Amino acid sequence: MSPFFREQTLLTKAIWIALVADATLAIVELRFSLAFIALVTLALSMAPALVAKWAAIEVPKGFVLAVVVFIAGTVFLGEVYDFYNKLWWWDMMMHGGSAVGFGLIGFVLVFMMFQGDRFAAPPSAIAVFAFCFAVAIGAIWEIFEFTMDQLFGMNMQKSGLMDTMGDLIVDCIGAMIGAGAGYAYLRGQQLGGMTGVIEDFVRRNPRFFRKWRR
């Protein structure tokens, strides 16, 4: 077992194992479209953690788990097990939760660019960048859904324009929450879990935040 796999949370490992098992079973049963979706889900869910490891960035395990749950919930549970139609709130929860996460990522990225110097750019400017980053990721995801629908006959966009616009609106709300948490962090405020995630990331990667002082 590789160190990369061992260092993940139990739930993250369970999701990856389940995806591999589903892909294997689908291949045995000659259900190649299902196998393809399972393998794409596995690759997408592992990519962020692998990129972080390659860049020598220590990402909190809980954050990796959140990414894995989002991708598995969106691509696999949403499409293969039809959660989007069975649970009316599933799509909003997936997009809203991911937008909050990407808002936090956008904040951390620009904060790293300034090496934690909160005087190099006003907190409001960093928050705006974080918001735009999260919304851009949401837009790219909509392009991904459109591509999957057109090339592989899937139905990720459901009602087309209404689904896409609804997802983007939810993305904007979630991005605003994530960026707001970053803004509050720079202002020295505590908002529980979200500012705690930022603090944890800064603590784990001090070389990227040499100028950060409380």
Image (tube, helix red, strand yellow):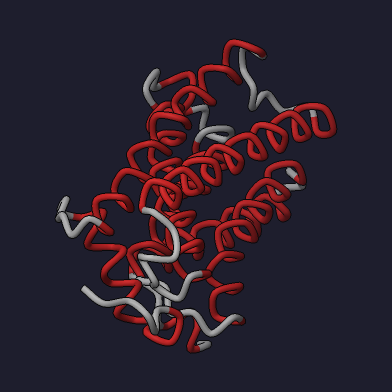
Residue at horizontal 36%, vertical 45%?
A: 178
Q: Residue furthest right?
A: 151
Closer-to-camera residue (91/164): 164
Q: Position of residue 142 (x, y in %)?
A: 65, 32
**Image vertical order of residue 112 relative to residue 132, above or below:** below
Closer-to-camera residue (70/152): 70
Closer-to-camera residue (138/67): 138
Please indicate whether residue 119 sits to the left or right of residue 3 in the image. left
Total number of numbered labels?
Answer: 0
Please indicate whether residue 117 sits to the left or right of residue 2 in the image. left
Please indicate whether residue 172 sits to the left or right of residue 76 in the image. left
Residue at horizontal 38%, vertical 36%?
A: 176
Q: Position of residue 75 (x, y in %)?
A: 58, 41
**Image vertical order of residue 64 relative to residue 91, above or below:** below
Please indicate whether residue 208 sits to the left or right of residue 139 in the image. left
**Image vertical order of residue 160 relative to residue 44, above or below:** above
Residue at horizontal 39%, vertical 84%?
A: 210
Which quadrant would residue 197 be assigned to in this image?
A: bottom left
Q: Position of residue 190 (x, y in %)?
A: 14, 55
Closer-to-camera residue (85/97): 97
Residue at horizontal 61%, vertical 72%?
A: 51
Q: Position of residue 135 (x, y in %)?
A: 54, 37
Q: Residue furthest front?
A: 119
If the image is split into quadrants, where does the C terminus sit? bottom left
Which quadrant would residue 118 be assigned to in this image?
A: bottom left
